[in-house]
Amino acid sequence: MKKLFSLLSIIGIVAISNCSRIPENNDPILGIWARTQISTLEDKSAESTREEWIFNDVYLGRYQSYSNSKLVFYTDFKWSVDNGTYTIIYGDPQVTDVTVNMEKANEPEILTLENGSVFATRE
């Protein structure tokens, strides 16, 4: 009887796990977006700052900030989309949440803020 119960339990678990499917997310924002700034210091040396947003298909992502190619800050974020407007909600209070729109007509594609300024470009 124990063998029969074990066999039925295994069959039930396999049947239930095969019935559940994760919906596929093909949102155009998926991938890596970046913004780079280069500033010249008084001693004529250059300092570069690079920010990256990595969007994945489960509405999560990773924000990373680099200074002269060294990682100085990172945090996770959640993202959502509503009528083509993307909201990025960071997991760290040091970073302000932001709302952006995707401009698909440009090459490379860009994310813009509400005032129209460029937020990031697709890598």
Image (tube, rainbow, N blue to C red):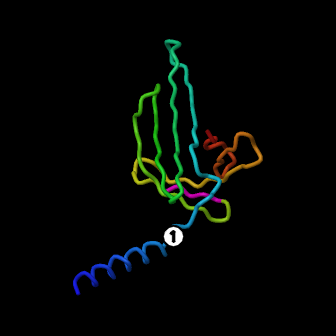
Residue at disc 1, secondary structure: loop
Residue 37 drawn at (x, y percent): 57, 30
Residue 43 lies, with reference to residue 65, above or below; the image says above
Q: Tally the marks.
A: 1
Residue 58 lies, with reference to residue 96, above or below; the image says below
Quadrant of the frame with the N terminus = bottom left
Question: Looking at the image, which residue sits at the far bottom?
Answer: 1
Residue at horizontal 46 percent and vertical 27 percent from the top:
69
Tag 1: amino acid: Arg
The magenta segment: 85-89
Residue 99 drawn at (x, y percent): 58, 55
Residue at horizontal 52 percent and vertical 26 percent from the top:
48
Residue at horizontal 33 percent and vertical 82 percent from the top:
8
Question: Looking at the image, which residue sits at the far top?
Answer: 43
Residue under label 1, please give it: 21
Depth check, front residue: 77 or 3? 3
Please check the rendered image and state whether residue 111 is part of the magenta-colored stretch, yes or no: no
Question: Looking at the image, which residue sits at the far right?
Answer: 105
